[in-house]
Amino acid sequence: MRKFLKDNGLSLGFGTLFLGTLVGQAFVGHADFNVRAVEHQEGTVSLWRYVTSSDFGVDVMENWQSEYLQFTLFILGTIWLLQRGSPESKEMHKAGRESDRAQRVHGHADDRSPRWAAAGGLRTWLYSWSLLLVMCGIWLASWGAQAITGRVAYNADKLVHHEGTVSFLEYLGTSDFWNRTLQNWQSEFLAVGSMAILAVYLRARGSPESKPVGATHEETGVEG
């Protein structure tokens, strides 16, 4: 058990933080929802009804989709885009997909390489892009879920105010949908851009997201 915890500490640690904050969001979101309901002289709801509602769903999904978009674009961007001096960037001469030898695929795979790295054809192509494909798939799925739950919440608010509802396609053109989307996208892009440039000049000793403390500002792609 100790070995398992040590070997999986990063994923277990953030998984625990994720579940803890999701539960916390459910409780405080439920309380806030009921406060607003009382203010508008409407009925309150149970915790279970709240966490299965579109109000809770859209709040969760709009954050999920922006996070996975961030990683999708970061993975894709760092294949070709470089930042001199940043550990988040590849070395300046390695832009692009790199050679089969560098990536250890096809005839350059060794005995310890995953089987699909040496298989060739579609299997190697799929495995070569598997991280990007899965991240992009989760982003699109969560963005779609945000649109669906957002429309339900939007129409529920319209009905409360005795206004007409909108179709799914009409909702995709509303300011509500794009405000929920863009307010998350801009913060993710800022965070990634800030990390790329700040890591050129600043350090976090022992972190692979930082260069070694004594590394020069010009060293690119090195980890501490």
Image: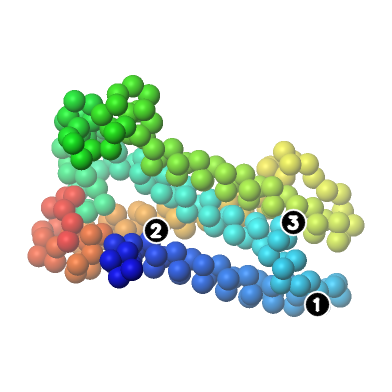
At mark 2, the secondary structure is helix
Q: Is residue 112 above or below residue 48?
A: above
Q: Position of residue 10 (x, y in %)?
A: 34, 63
At mark 3, the secondary structure is helix
Tell me which label, 3 or 2, sits earlier in the chain: 3
Tell me which label, 3 or 1, sits earlier in the chain: 1
- What residue does disc 2 label? 191
Taking the spot 19% from the left edge, 67% from the top edge, the residue there is 206
Q: Amino acid at mark 2?
A: Ala
Q: Is residue 95 visible?
A: no
Q: Which residue occupies the extreme top position in the image?
A: 121
Q: Is residue 76 left or right of residue 140?
A: left
Task: Name the foreground residue: 128 vs 61.
Answer: 128
Taking the spot 63% from the left edge, 48% from the top edge, the residue there is 145
Tags 3 and 2 touching, CB below 8 Å: no
- What residue does disc 3 label? 153
Q: Is residue 139 above or below residue 194?
A: above
- Choose top left, top right, bottom left or bottom right for residue 217: bottom left
- Choose top left, top right, bottom left or bottom right for residue 48: bottom right
Q: Is residue 136 visible?
A: yes
- What residue does disc 1 label? 39
Tell me which label, 1 or 2, sits earlier in the chain: 1
At mark 1, the secondary structure is helix
Q: Which residue occupies the extreme front position in the image?
A: 1
Q: Is residue 148 left or right of residue 25?
A: right
Q: Position of residue 42 (x, y in %)?
A: 85, 72
